[in-house]
Image (cartoon, rainbow, N blue to C red):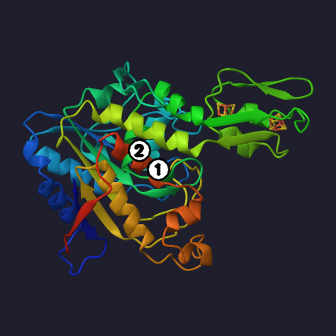
Amino acid sequence: MTGDVWFTPFESTGKTDALHRRVSMMIHRTGFFDALSAGDRVAVKIHPGEKNNITYLRPSLVRAVVAQLLRRDASPFVTETTTLYCRERFTAEELVSTAAWNGFTTETLGCPFVVADLGTDVVVDVRGRYLDQVHIAAEVASADALVVLTHLTGHPWTAGLAGSLKQLGMGCVGRKTKADVHLSTSITINPDLCNACGKCAAVCKSKAILVGEESASLNDRCVRCGVCVGSCSQGAIGYSHDYDWFARALSEAAAGVLSLFARGRVVFVNFLTDITWHCDCEDFSDSPVFPDLGVVVSLDTVASDQASADLVNASTPLPGTRADRPEVAGSTDKIMAMTGIEWWKQLDHAESLGLGTRDYNLNTVKS
Ligand code: SF4
Ligand code: SF4
């Protein structure tokens, strides 16, 4: 099986050309729009960026897709789940506030911005190697169709690559499944190094750290998000991660989400712009490390991420950036050389689960 993937370069050749138009054209060519019926509730999944991040998906690109859905008499809503980690998208109120801060509101989008996991998760059996069940965010589960808009980045902590598969397996699921996937991570506090300063407890919104007279300790509320690690100047908090586990559990969570939709009812749009070393969950601004390459569209999450990664790996890193080092720039797998993580394992496992194929046809749509 070979996946059909459409790609358009970022640059325009004339003043009348627009990336928005070519993105809509590519979605149309997948057949996704034609499969919609009037009134279909279409979830448009985005990552609105963490507070202080400035390289996330551009709101006007989301609005352009929403406009196309409205033209077809669908009923779109833009959506995202709250986070497992405790930054500024941890609660529903914080997520709505951060999304608005970053430019995603009902007014700017032309449709409602909805917190996906406010309602009760829908649970599906997957019987995978790592997950038995997947808890899917209520608003995603109740949609008739799904548009996954992904700002593709590196992901140096866990996945290596943050693409459409990660949007499904982490971004569309409830906290139970997010936590299950993070069982791949282990957090420890070394009492010999800890001075009981309490800084870690101050950043942990899960209230998972107890600070005693001489040292801190973890309780069972810890969801292994890793946010506290950077708060400790004593190096007392240990972090270890089973990358294989994470990649495969992530794919199984994605399988659970896709099991709710018929083929052709989910389309993946990967934006290869402002490509940073880290993902949009980071709460700081940073330089992109690869040039703006373009946009990839497919009905196949595996093919879309594989094609996107291949385009990044074939590009030349931006001068002076973290990727512009001989060991990265000279590598055929720049994403792995940059993050140190075998990012392709998530795609490999997803392919074995029948979610798509790493073998694809690339159809280029020129401006
Ligand atoms: S921040 Fe580090 S030193 Fe301070 S209480 Fe937490 S683990 Fe201990
Ligand atoms: S203690 Fe656990 S839940 Fe709290 S910030 Fe650290 S890793 Fe996250």
Q: How far from the left and from the top, in percent, is residue 179?
A: 54, 29
**Relative height, residue 334 to residue 320 (above, below):** above
Badge 2 element: helix
- Ligand 2 appears in which quadrant? top right
Residue ID at (36%, 55%)? 305
Residue ID at (43%, 43%)? 99
Identify the mark at residue 349; answer none if there is no mark.
2
Identify the mark at residue 345; answer none if there is no mark.
1
Task: Please indicate whether residue 165 sits to the left or right of residue 224 in the image.
Answer: left
The amino acid on which the numbered mark 2 sits, given as a three-letter code, is His
Task: Please indicate whether residue 353 sits to the left or right of residue 88 in the image.
Answer: left
Between 65 and 94, which is closer to the camera in this rendering?
Answer: 65
Residue ID at (67%, 20%)? 220
**Relative height, residue 15 to residue 30 (above, below):** below
Mark 2: few/some/many CA within 10 Å (<14, 14-19, 20+): some
Task: Please indicate whether residue 131 sits to the left or right of residue 11 in the image.
Answer: right
**Which quarter of the picture shows residue 206?**
top right
The answer as to whether callout 1 falls within 8 Å of ligand 2 is: no
Taking the image as drawn, is residue 334 in sight?
Answer: yes
The amino acid on which the numbered mark 1 sits, given as a three-letter code, is Lys
Mark 1: few/some/many CA within 10 Å (<14, 14-19, 20+): some
Disc 2 + disc 1, Cβ < 8 Å: yes
Badge 1 element: helix
Q: Quadrant of the C terminus?
A: bottom left
Instruction: Compute the Cα span from label 2 to label 1.
Output: 6 Å
Q: How far from the left and from the top, in percent, is residue 43?
A: 26, 37
